[in-house]
Amino acid sequence: MEYFMMPTEKALQQFKKSEKDVIGGLCSLANIPLSPETAQDQERRIRREIANSNERRRMQSINAGFQSLKTLLPHTDGEKLSKAAILQQTSDYIFALEQEKTQLLQQNNQLKRFIQEFSGSSPKRRRGAEEKDEGIGSPDILEEEKAEELRREMLELRQQLDKERSARMILEEQVRSLDMVLHPERLKVITQQVQEEQAHIQTQTLLRLQQLHAETSAERDRHAAHSPQVQRHTGY
């Protein structure tokens, strides 16, 4: 009983605070004007609740942003990551995308140089120079058709390069928008589509360029093989 008759200072403060809250609530319900001290306490309590609510919303927004950012990272489904780990892996992922973009630019320039070297002079001029050196007097119809087919192939390769350039632009846009995390699911789908399309275009283009290079080499070897026979025939 002595304990309740002599409360501690902390318990007394809590009791007074609760009493003021009860009095303030009853006065509000009864439309009775509050005392200045009670009104100030109630105002401070409302401000504190508003500040706490704003802080909770801010933390929820930050957590949602980190979760959205995590969905963009590859191979993280079901894995628990801290905010620091998410930021680190995001930085590594952006660096990897930048390296991939640089690699695509180098491959694009390499393909352009290969096409320029291959189509530096028209097939008709190259064939005319070879015929002049080898002593062949009349053009071959089959070679004309072959040259036309090669021209069509080169046109298709240029179109594929245009597609590769468009895909690279999409990839650059993806890198720029990764930090913003505006549409995480849509961005993840775009990333996968760009990577698949890019790999397919590069594979098909390189295979076709290798095939054209092999056909051109075989055609030159065939002309070189027929050249001695033609010269011996003209010598008789």
Image: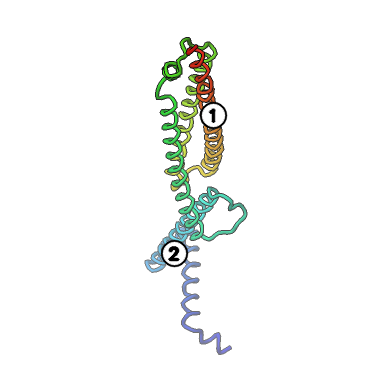
As displayed, is residue 10 above or below residue 208?
Answer: below
Estimate the x, y position of residue 173 in percent, counting from the top left. 43, 39
Q: How is the image coloured?
A: rainbow
- Image quadrant in which the N terminus is located: bottom right
Residue at image point 46% right, 49% down: 94
Secondary structure beneath dot 1 equals helix
As displayed, is residue 19 above or below residue 48?
Answer: below
Estimate the x, y position of residue 122 in percent, counting from the top left. 42, 19
Quarter of the view holding residue 130: top left
Q: Residue type at mark 2?
A: Arg
Estimate the x, y position of residue 123 in percent, counting from the top left. 45, 19
Estimate the x, y position of residue 120 in percent, counting from the top left. 40, 25
Q: Earlier in the sequence, mark 1 or mark 2?
A: 2
Residue at image point 48% right, 9% down: 138
Secondary structure beneath dot 2 equals helix
Q: CA distance from mark 1 to mark 2?
A: 83 Å
Pointer 2: what residue? 45
Q: Residue type at mark 1?
A: Ala
Front in this rendered view, residue 128 or 54: 128
Front in this rendered view, residue 209 or 90: 209
Instruction: Tell me: 73 left or right of 129.
Output: right
Pointer 1: what residue? 214
Determine the residue located farthest toward the right in the rendered image. 78
Residue at image point 46% right, 38% down: 107
Q: Residues within 10 Å of mark 2 (few under 14, many from 20)?
A: few
Determine the residue located farthest toward the bottom in the rendered image. 2
Front in this rendered view, residue 90 or 141: 141
